[in-house]
Amino acid sequence: MNYKTVELSRWSRGDLFQYYINSMRIVMSLTADVDVTGLLSFSKDRRLKFYPVMIWAVSKIVNAHDEFKYGWDAAGNLIKWDLVSPSYTDFHAQDERFTKLLTPYSDDLPEFHARFMADREKYQDCRAFVKNQPSNFFDVSCLPWVRYRHFDVHVFDEGKFLAPVVTWGKYERENGKYIMPVMMNIHHAVADGFHLSRFFAELQELIASSA
């Protein structure tokens, strides 16, 4: 878990960050339809589970940009992680409860998929949060039962949670394609609408390249 402490006076976004943290704590939320047709075919052809493949795709884009990797150290200093890993939910239909897991991110999809499947097996009897998870995470979840137009998550802390929160819903066939809603929440102190828009554009490009 390597990171660098951010010196606000030397950071080009330092003044803006301080304003949004000290005077106006805003979390932005955006939902966009994503064409996952290629990723579904890619996963099926390689006998991979779609859920971890989608988590990997989101993680790859998140790790490509600094704005999604900020957090706080134990002393309350602003830091930027070298890498962040997905903290995700694993739903258990038999009792309608979930396990909250963190699988270390790898840029190599087969390696990440193998790690995901091993963690899912290891903690299949656990419910709620697996203990002692690392701090370099962002949040991922899925609502595969409904295709929504908008979804929002409120983090009720003191308004300083900086990591992205990404959620997607049910994919449905539309005009010969499979369309799925994807949502991201991010603190305005570390990102703007441009950064949100770029996340969705690059996620779509990555998915399209897998077709």
Image (spheres, helix red, strand yellow):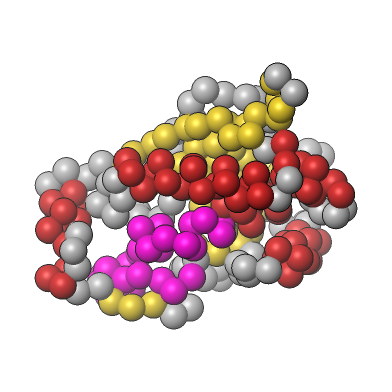
In front of the other: 190 or 165: 190
Q: Residue furthest top?
A: 175
State the residue at coordinates (62%, 68%). 107
State the residue at coordinates (64%, 46%). 207
Residue 43 location in percent, x, y? 79, 49
Report the magenta residues as a range: 59-83
Residue 120 location in percent, x, y? 76, 59
State the residue at coordinates (69%, 20%). 174
Left or right placement of residue 55 versus residue 84 in this view: right
> Is the residue 87 above or below the residue 25 in the image?
below
> Is the residue 91 above or below the residue 61 in the image?
above
State the residue at coordinates (56%, 30%). 33
Name the quarter where the C terminus is drawn: top right
Q: How many marks?
A: 0
Question: Could one spot residue 8 in this view of the protein?
Answer: yes
- Name the image quarter holding residue 177: top right
Residue 35 location in percent, x, y? 63, 34
Is residue 101 in the magenta section? no
- Name the image quarter holding residue 192: top left
In front of the other: 20 or 37: 37
Is residue 78 in the magenta section? yes
